[in-house]
Amino acid sequence: MSEYNEHKAIVMYINYKYPKAIYRSDLSGVKMSMGTIRKMAALNKYKGFPDLIIYEPNLKYIGLVLEIKKEGSNPYKQNGELKSSEHLENQVFWLNHLSKLGFKTSFIVGVPEAIKIIDKYFNNEV
């Protein structure tokens, strides 16, 4: 499944299961011309900003922030350390920063993992 289709599946799940939830998903995986990419970059100040933010509080957090990785990929090495990449380091920076502000944050891999954490979040299990 493409990154776009994974994002679409996650958003469709949120719309179905939590129709009143307020969220924002970026344009991950959407094919764009270089001109459009440049325009988008000019409008987005921060590199590595998370893929999906749910602006609904639960009993512990002010919202849920997910950095979504395509099924079959993994941002971590076998020893648990983050793989070496400026892009991943920027993503970790934002997850850590938003966590300090009161959001539940997580890297997730694939649609099933996203659904699991979204459900746990809305059920106050995280």
Image: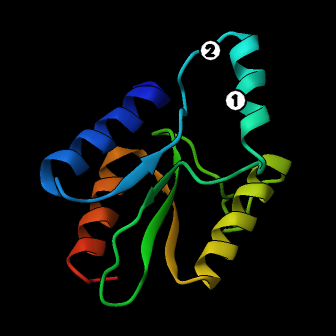
Task: Identify the secondary structure beneath mark 1.
Answer: helix
On the image, the x and y values in percent for residue 40 come to 69, 29
Inspect this view and state whether residue 85 appears: no
Q: Position of residue 35 (x, y in %)?
A: 75, 12
Q: Secondary structure at mark 2?
A: loop
Image quadrant occupied by the C terminus:
bottom left
Would you place residue 37 above or below residue 88 in this image?
Answer: above
**Left of 60 or right of it: where is 88?**
right
Residue 20 vs residue 112, the one in the foreground: 20
Q: For this view, does 34 lie left or right of residue 53? A: right
Give the residue at mark 2: 32
Residue carrying label 1: 40
In the image, 113 versus 54, the foreground residue is 54
User: Which amino acid, by three-letter code, is at mark 1?
Assistant: Met
Is label 2 in contact with label 1 (beta carbons under 8 Å)? Answer: yes
Horizontal arrangement in the rendering, residue 98 relative to residue 22 (left or right) = right
Q: Position of residue 77 (x, y in %)?
A: 70, 58
The answer to whether residue 63 is visible is yes
| Residue at image location 41% in from the left, 37% down from the top | 7
**Label 2 amino acid?**
Met
Q: Earlier in the sequence, mark 2 or mark 1?
A: 2
- Looking at the image, which residue is at 72% across and 22% down? 37
Vertical arrangement, residue 104 with respect to residue 76, above or below = below
Q: Which mark is residue 31?
A: none
Q: Characterize the local packing of mark 2: few (<14), some (14-19) or many (20 or more) Cα atoms within 10 angstroms.
A: few
Q: Is residue 90 above or below residue 26?
A: below
Q: Residue at x 27, y 83 (%)?
A: 125
* Image side of residue 45 versus residue 74, left or right: right
